[in-house]
Amino acid sequence: MNQAIRNTWIIAIAMFALLFGSLTVVQFFEADNLNANDWNSRTLYKDFDKNRGAILVAGNPIAESVPSSDDEFEFQRVYNDPELYGPLTGFYSLVYGATQMESAMNGELSGSSNDFFYDRILQLFSGSQVAGASVELTIDPELQKLAYDSIPDGVKGSIVVMEPKTGNILAMVSKPSFDPNQLAGHNTEEVAANMAELEEVPGLSPFTNPATESLLAPGSVFKLVDTAAALESGKYDEDSKLDNPAELPLPGTNVSLPNFVNGGCSARTTADFSFALEQSCNTPFAQIAMDLGEDAIADQAAKFGFGESYNIPVNVTASQFPTGMSDDLLAQAAIGQYDVRVTPLQVAMMTSAIANDGMLMKPNLVRTVRAPDLRVLDSPKPEELQRSLSAENAQLIQQWMVNAVDRGIANRAAIPGVEVAGKTGTAELLAGSEGNNSWFTGFAPADDPQAVVSVVIEDVDLATGSQLTSPSARQLLEAVLNK
Amino acid sequence: MSELQTAPKSRRNTELLLLLLALVVGVGANMLVGLDQDRAFDQDFFAQCITLSAVALAVHIVLRLRAKYADPVILPIVIALNGIGLAMIHRLDIATGDAAAARQLMWTGLAIAAMIALIWLLRDHRVLRRFTYISLIISAVLLMLPLLPGVGVELNGARIWVNLGFATFQPGEIAKITLAIFFAGYLSTNRDLILLAGKKVGPLQLPRWRDLGPMVVAWLVSIGVLIFQRDLGSSILFFGLFMVMIYVATSRISWILIGLLMIAFGGFVAFKLFPHVTARIDGWINAFDPEVYNRIGGSHQIVQGLFGLASGGLTGTGLGQGRPDIVTFANSDMIIAALGEELGLVGLSAIVLLYVLLVTRGIRAALGTRDSFGKLLATGLSFTLALQCFVVIGGVTRLIPLTGLTTPFLAAGGSSLLANWLIIGLLLLISDAARRPAVPGHSGAGQPPRPVSGVQGRSSTSRTSTDGNRKHNTREVKQP
């Protein structure tokens, strides 16, 4: 009987051994998979119990975690000036996850990045929670407010203000905006209802930041790329004479590409670059593109940053220049029509490269990342992304852009006593439709650029567009120069 | 065994020392729970600490008086487990606003009082052998009770509760003890008979058909529990209990094989016929299938339990730092997941090791005691504890399908606590008998103890002695 009892013990021990095995599998080998499972609300709960770091602008929090007393979570995310910064901060939601800055800087904000390795070891022993780092943005609150207010309510548009010498972004606004507080609540039903309501707003997607993620037809702003490509090719220089017919028949089709009928282009049938840019004539640039070929334009576009997505640290969608075009399509692409698509930030980037004597700086939104004890964990240095064009050619284009403001169609951006450089653009959205994307991109002062301002107003008629874009840019540039 | 006889030490002081250690674990866990929630040293804390310490010391004193030679490790282990359970239930109360810890504390007191009464009144486990058939009747009544209209209550799909007016009670928990007593009594009496009759087929000695009777009864009880009470866990438990006891009684593998075949058959039929069993199996195999996960009664609970365990990882989140309250039935069925989340693999392994030690000490008592009734009872009860752990923890970790058994001493639940403490009482008594120095006349409460060489006696018994044994046994059966 005793042998059977011993065998019973062995059976019991074998069962316990199986339990140790299965516990080890679940808690060790499979733990990462289980923690990453979509159904696992625990990871989310864990995050929402954390004292998440604040997002700061000029020292003031625009997103912060405050103790939450009335529900099962320890902290509630609160957004200040929510609509002003909404597309920039994004939201931190139980239901919809995190977006934009909340997502891009999540490691730092939640205290889970590698910078906190030492703190987490300490936490093991002290039992105290690791509080997240705060992230100070490069945004200037006054410029941000000014930019936001210069887009009227009910109009869809974005503005980017960027320092060309550092890549630091001083303002980045979009309308229509939204209030992230509506999505940061802990009542999931309420949040879902709010989201449904927000998605009804025309032109608004709460998940995206239009300034970095909307792909828009650039219109004549793209002529800056053509100009740079022409100069860089060596085939053209400042004295080049360009044919400027009122209409350019497109090869292989029976349509022709016109200059703007009521514009100043009709004054000359040959033009130099300065005149062509001042009056934004279409036919010279279409001809240049067909002369240089698709590859040359595409290469120049890539040097300005097309075709790449960036993390600044929020995600920037890659701007597109189409490939494999026939000449007629290339001609249209050269004036920023057909399938050319840019983000507002991309326009600011190429303008910055020109303003910064040809050197494209990496756009950046983060000034400093600080641990809760105020120790600086990170403060990104200005970073050269790539040379877009030679300094000489950049300076040529700078001067032509100044002319465009002084005596061209961008004159509404002029500031008395300051050399402002600028280029407008108007992209037709659909044949026959009244709607246009109206652009202005420029910088000041031209000899020592302090700021690049890129404005786009979407889907407006011509007059409204030009009333909104260039004057807004002027206001912003004035504000920068008055600092 | 022999060295225990030659060195009879009571080891009660060892027990006291270990008991203090166990209380430090239990009280310490409770204190951590309070500290984390900024409500350290509140009324609940002191109520729990004082009650737990008082009953632990009370048992210790009773053992000094009545069962001096009882195993010194068993009580501290169980107090530690009970204390950890109380702390975790208290911690979950704070999260959910329940008051389960107070009820658990009351039941702990009640269960330990009942155990003290058992030790005090029974003194010697062999007395129970007289109640072999009464135990069977009590078992039957206990198992029938939940099915009676007006008395029985159906909760969460299983009809295993009775309404006592102030609380619900699971008579099946007590039935596992009375069934163990019946099996032990029946098998120790009829062991030789079952052992020696029957045909030999190859290496297997097959039992006679009529000796299969009790096994069929056990099988029917298990299937009955499964069908009428819809309680898969208890069904497995009862059948496992009987299989082990008949194996220990006969040392025959053939019984195990027959038992496994019967389980396989019963299990297959149940899987095919009963939707609640089908659902369990489906929730086990296809736990991560979205359809199964979202189904009512599907795999949501087990998957959430797995998430809990996984988030605990190696070292756990620390008591009070995790979110074990997300799991349904976190303080009863799923308390292992809650402990795994907050104490980690390390802490949970320590807890499982406590069970290993506890089962081992129970088996040790079975080896040490001299009477076959005690051996069978101690093995059966110890194995019951091991099997419960296996079914529960295996279910929670998705090793086997999840069934609704309680984790002994940890899970919230009065009936389970009472039953398991009574099991501990019996194991303590048996271990006392095992370690008590063999003084003639002292241990003669029941039948005279079998000779120590009982094992050899069995193996050397020849077929010719069968008749003599049979007579002896039939006489014994008639006695009570």
Image (spheres, helix red, strand yellow):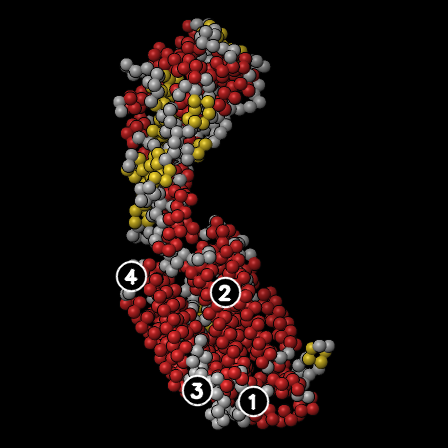
Which image quadrant is residue B467 in?
bottom right
Q: Chain of mark 1?
A: B
N-term-proximal mark, 2 vs 3: 3
Residue drawn at x 53%, y 58% is A25
Q: Amino acid at mark 4?
A: Arg
N-term-proximal mark, 1 vs 2: 2
Which image quadrant is residue B267 in?
bottom right
Q: Amino acid at mark 3?
A: Leu
Q: Amino acid at mark 1?
A: Arg
Above or below: residue A219 compared with residue A381: above
State the separation of the CA atoms marked 1 and 2.
Answer: 38 Å
Residue drawn at x 35%, y 45% is A132
Residue drawn at x 32%, y 34% is A84
State the separation of the CA atoms marked 4 and 2.
Answer: 31 Å
Q: Which residue is mark 3?
A: B122
N-term-proximal mark, 3 vs 4: 4
SS type, badge 4 = loop
